[in-house]
Amino acid sequence: MAAAATAAPGAPGMDTRLDQETARWLRWDRNPLTLESAKQLMADGNKEELQKCFGARMEFGTAGLRAAMGTGISHMNDLTIIQTTQGFCRYLEKQFSDLKQRGVVISFDARAHPPSGGNSKRFARLAATTFITQGIPVYLFSGITPTPFVPYTVLHLKLCAGIMITASHNPKQDNGYKVYWDNGAQITSPHDKGISQAIEENLEPWPQAWDDSLINGSPLLHDPSASINKSYFEDLKKYCFHRSVNRETKVTFVHTSVHGVGHEFVQSAFKAFGFAPPEAVPEQKDPDPEFPTVKYPNPEEGKGVLTLSFALADKTKAKIILANDPDADRLAVAEKQDSGEWRVFSGNELGALLGWWLFTSWKEKNQDHSALKDLYMLSSTVSSKILRAIALKEGFHFEETLTGFKWMGNRAKQLIDQGKNVLFAFEEAIGYMCCPFVLDKDGVSAAVISAELASFLATKNLSLSQQLKAIYVEYGYHITKASYFICHDQGTIKKLFENLRNYDGKNNYPKTCGRFEIAGIRDLTTGYDDSQPDKKAVLPTSKSSQMITFTFANGGVATMRTSGTEPKIKYYSELCAPPWNSDPEQLKKELNELVSAIEEHFFQPQKYNLQPKAE
């Protein structure tokens, strides 16, 4: 069968490699659907498809794996899950001498891809089989859970590692393999490189790799579902500050889990806080891997995902909508305004509200101000600097990290280990860490804490929007705008960023952007930062991803960066004003003009053939 692959002309080296990969696939794959699909591609001599499926293995990065389900080494399927887990297992054995005593936790979302027979639960079982055949205990959840339950379990049971099979809010054909270290945070370098190398060294499935029935009666298999459910919500109760307000509140809530895993967990969270349950959007409350009612299952995309939520809220007279993404680690919040319009808060706005609320609640319980010196909040470098403004005025510490919760989770753990109190961390991509017993974003805790905030404000006749305005008046307006362009060609992306580094053709960055003067530049790809005496960036740099931040003379800051999981070039911009400058409309106008200049002069969408974000 493999001979068909060499029939069509092509680069000889490429052909040989493809032949090797496809021959190994035929030897090793025991999933009848992906095996048949590979045989068909070879029989058809379909070079282009063979190249797509077998040309390059999925890259294992700090976010683990994320790819479409299907046949071949470039896709998520039974065989690539086995191979990845074998590598991860061998790597963990080298790192932890007590791996066989402590073990790992594995959970999964509700994704499924019938054409290739792949689904999250099956992938989780195959991963569990890999560990158990090596004598390593596995805590495998028996049903779907939110992603944050994995890092929670790692810390709670003091395990060596955690695996979550999920593609979060990606399109329905995708799946992913997300990895946590024994500190309860996502892995950082060089673990990704080490795991990657170990995968390459353990590609051939081990003798019992395919026999997932052997784990059923194994003494090494544990189901942590009941005990973790109980302890998570017990721990969550410690962050409930106004149980009597919650019990009596007249504020009503609509919740959507967008066909994902969140429904029953958010219901439990509301119960833990003394609330009546939120109204669930009936068409979206049960897990459905087809995501039939939305174009993208991502609440970050705004109003399109919330259409059914708005309709239910209008019908039930609910004021607040809480929306989780499909693996319930993110949260979007919308509020009915007096005008009858719905306002969907941006990630930065909700970050400001939750940060203010958690600090206010902390302050009420801690009259001793000396404790402020050990109090910390974190946010990522592309998120709003509103927490910095609050910290400066209130006297606690604020730190920024690189983009992504792996950085905030790991930094939070370092601080906690030093005896510090990390109150809150957030990123603008609607990710919030409100309770440090999960060192990652958690949409379940964020949902119920947002509900308590709204209920408390209602007793003062305030809405979330009014409170947000009060925060800006007190600490200074922080106006933000973020978007992205789509670009599928890595070469083009590289060219665009190299052009910014050689703007005048002589290794110089731009000095202006349209009418806006540039006051500072930080390039975290190359490690350059002109605000530092030695011109070296303080935050870690990464040559494999592009990221440049421009500081403008008018107080504006804009970052352009590539995405680790999507074919996007993203930008984030913010204009920060001191507390006495309270003309938000003027600030918005100035920021819009700055963003237009960045799009025109730095992105040059016509020149680079970039697709704008679809509204």
Image (cartoon, rainbow, N blue to C red):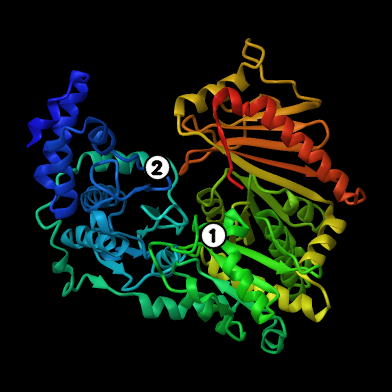
In the picture of the structure, the residue carrying the numbered disc 1 is 441
- Can you give x and y, in whole percent of width and height, for residue 609 in the image? 54, 27
Q: How many numbered callouts?
A: 2
- Residue type, mark 1 in image: Lys
- Residue type, mark 2 in image: Gly
Q: Is residue 580 left or right of residue 39?
A: right
Residue extending farthest to the right is: 580
Crowd class of label 2 (few under 14; some 14 to 19; many from 20; radius 10 Å): many
Q: CA distance from mark 1 to mark 2?
A: 19 Å
Which secondary structure lies at badge 1? loop
For residue 96, which quarter of the picture? bottom left
Asked if 614 appears above or below 311 in the picture, the reply is above
Residue 561 shows in this picture: yes
Q: What's the residue at 10%, 31% (across, down)? A: 4
Asked if 525 appears above or below 587 in the picture, the reply is above
Residue 31 shows in this picture: no
Q: Is residue 65 left or right of residue 589?
A: left
> 297 or 406: which is nearer to us?
297
In the picture of the structure, the residue carrying the numbered disc 2 is 61
Asked if 88 appears above or below 127 in the picture, the reply is above
**Label for residue 246?**
none
